[in-house]
Amino acid sequence: MLENVTGIVVSEHNYGEKSKIINLLTREKGIIGLMVKGARSLKSPLRSVTSKITYGTFNIVYKKDKLSKLNEVSVIDNFSNIKKDIILISYASYLVDLAYQVMKHKNDKLVFDNLILSLKKINSGLNPNVISNILELKYLDNLGVLPVLDSCVECGNKDNIVTLSSSRGGYLCKDCVLNEPIMSNKAIKLIRMYYYVDISKIDKIDIAPEVIHEINDFLSDYYDRYTGLYLKTKSFLVNLKNM
């Protein structure tokens, strides 16, 4: 069946001498594997539009639960600013890989939509660390392990929240905190906002570096504890930022 799908290339693998197989994350059908014949040939029109992070409309011969075939691609956004910067490329690669894993867990159009919105915001110049953390937090809901961010995880108290604990799974009030590190009040409030914010509405980010660092550290630890996702692109990004 000949169909058009809106998608982004997640990965590519060589096949034979001149072809390749790509994994495509799509809004309409979730994850699709595509055979792209001759794509590695220098003369192929598909060579430049089947690399990772290519976002466009893909005309395919669709075969449910089988390897489909790619005919042509109309690029929607090439994320030109991202592709000029190794740090931004690393963020984008990680977010695409993360979205792929989340979509495997739960096929939801919002997984795709929030990914594309995040990449557009990063491409427009917004802080990639903050945008990535916002997307990470939203994806925790899709993965079924969202921390408790509306009240104390232990007693349900909505007042006097003093910290956020990854080991205990959410907010802690002053009566329930034990020896957990105390987060800044700004980080406590912002992380809840991260979950509820509409990514499409973000046009400016003004957050102190130390607060960004607090939230990023929490989410990294939380992902390690509860998701079972260990992505090479995340490790590469962390190492690159620490250089």
Image (tube, grey):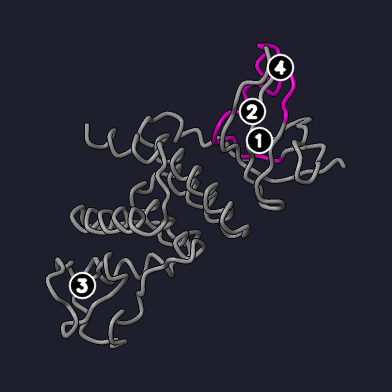
Of circles 4 and 1, the one toward us is: 4
Residue 73, located in which quarter of the rendered image?
top right
State the residue position of label 2. 49
Mark 2 surroundings within 10 Å by alpha-carbon count, few (fewer than 14), some (14 through 19), many (20 or more) = many
State the residue position of label 4. 44
* Foreground pick, 49 / 200: 49
Does 128 sit above or below residue 136? above
Circles 1, 2 touching at the beta carbon (< 8 Å): yes
**Secondary-structure class at tag 2:** loop
State the residue position of label 1. 75
Kind of residue at disc 2: Val
Of circles 3 and 2, the one toward us is: 3
Of circles 1 and 2, the one toward us is: 2
Mark 1 surroundings within 10 Å by alpha-carbon count, few (fewer than 14), some (14 through 19), many (20 or more) = some
Residue 155 picture location, percent across and down: 28, 87
State the residue position of label 3. 163
Residue 139 picture location, percent across and down: 47, 59
**Secondary-structure class at tag 3:** strand
* Foreground pick, 37 / 225: 225
